[in-house]
Image: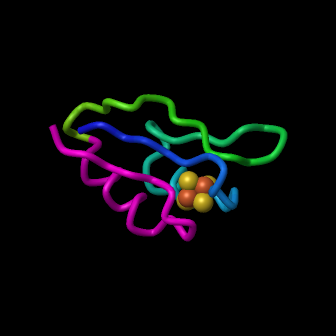
Amino acid sequence: MKITVEEDKCCAGGQCVLAAPEVFDQRDEDGIVVLLTDTPDSSKYEAVREAAQICPAACIHVADN
Ligand code: SF4
């Protein structure tokens, strides 16, 4: 799995962090998403896919290897 995020589309709501807190964080100053890892281990795949589905800005993209 390879994750990319489009920071310029992020609306800083933080749903991704709730879904997968070990993969996504938010910048302190403005809440924009911070990707903690773009290649999570397989135990995180389900949470990452959920985050991508619920992201209101559809700015989380997941590619399978
Ligand atoms: S769920 Fe999407 S829009 Fe919301 S903070 Fe995460 S990446 Fe940004």
Quadrant in which ligand 1 is drawn: bottom right
Residue 42 location (% of width, % of height): 19, 37
Q: Quadrant of the N terminus?
A: top left
The one nearer the camera, 24 or 63, is 63
Q: Relative to 55, does residue 43 appear above or below in the rendering?
A: above
Q: Left or right: 42 with respect to 3? A: left
Q: Position of residue 62 (x, y in %)?
A: 31, 49
Q: How is the image coloured?
A: rainbow
Residue at the image point whose x is 43% and y is 41% from the top: 4
Q: Is residue 57 magenta?
A: yes
Rendered residue at 51%/55% (across/down) = 16
Rendered residue at 45%/37% (across/down) = 22
Instruction: Find residue 39 and report its image quarter.
Output: top left
Query: In which quadrant of the rendered image does the C terminus lie?
Result: top left
Residue at the extreme left: 65
* In front of the other: 9 or 1: 9
Total marks drawn? 0
Q: Is residue 52 above or below residue 7?
A: below
Part of the protein shown in magenta:
44-65
Q: Is residue 26 magenta?
A: no
Viewed as shown, does residue 62 lie left or right of 34? left
Q: Give the image location of residue 11, x and y in percent.
A: 69, 61
Q: Position of residue 6 (x, y in %)?
A: 55, 48
Q: Quadrant of residue 37?
A: top left
Q: Is residue 55 left or right of residue 50?
A: right
